[in-house]
Amino acid sequence: MIEIKLPKQRLAMTESEFMELLRGRPDLWATALRRGKAFSRHEREVARTRQVFVKH
């Protein structure tokens, strides 16, 4: 189940429902993938920074 929180709303969708929505919008899919990769890189960088400060 995928949960999407919006202001004053909460959506709950299955993976297949979510994929069906994105199937018709390859541009949206590409944007979401780029954003997800950037988010992952940021999380890794934050984790590395925390490790440096904990060691010192």
Image (cartoon, helix red, strand yellow):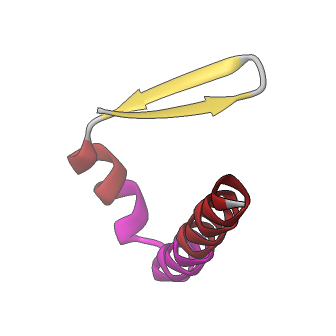
Check the picture and name the quadrant holding the N terminus.
Answer: top left
Which residue is at 62% across, 76% downward?
Answer: 38
Which residue is at 78% across, 26% downward?
Answer: 7
* 12 on left or right of 19: right
* Furthest-top residue in this view: 8
Is residue 33 found inside the magenta-colored segment of the image?
A: yes
Q: Where is residue 53 shown, x and y percent of the image?
A: 73, 59
* Furthest-right residue in this view: 7
Q: Where is residue 4 shown, x and y percent of the image?
A: 54, 35
Is residue 35 found inside the magenta-colored segment of the image?
A: yes
Q: Quadrant of residue 13?
A: top left
Report the number of discs.
Answer: 0
Q: Which region of the structure is painted magenta?
A: 21-38
Check the picture and name the quadrant holding the C terminus.
Answer: bottom right
Which residue is at 62% across, 30% downward?
Answer: 5
* 40 on left or right of 54: left
Q: Considering depth in this image, is 51 or 12 the residue closer to the camera?
A: 51
* Furthest-front residue in this view: 56
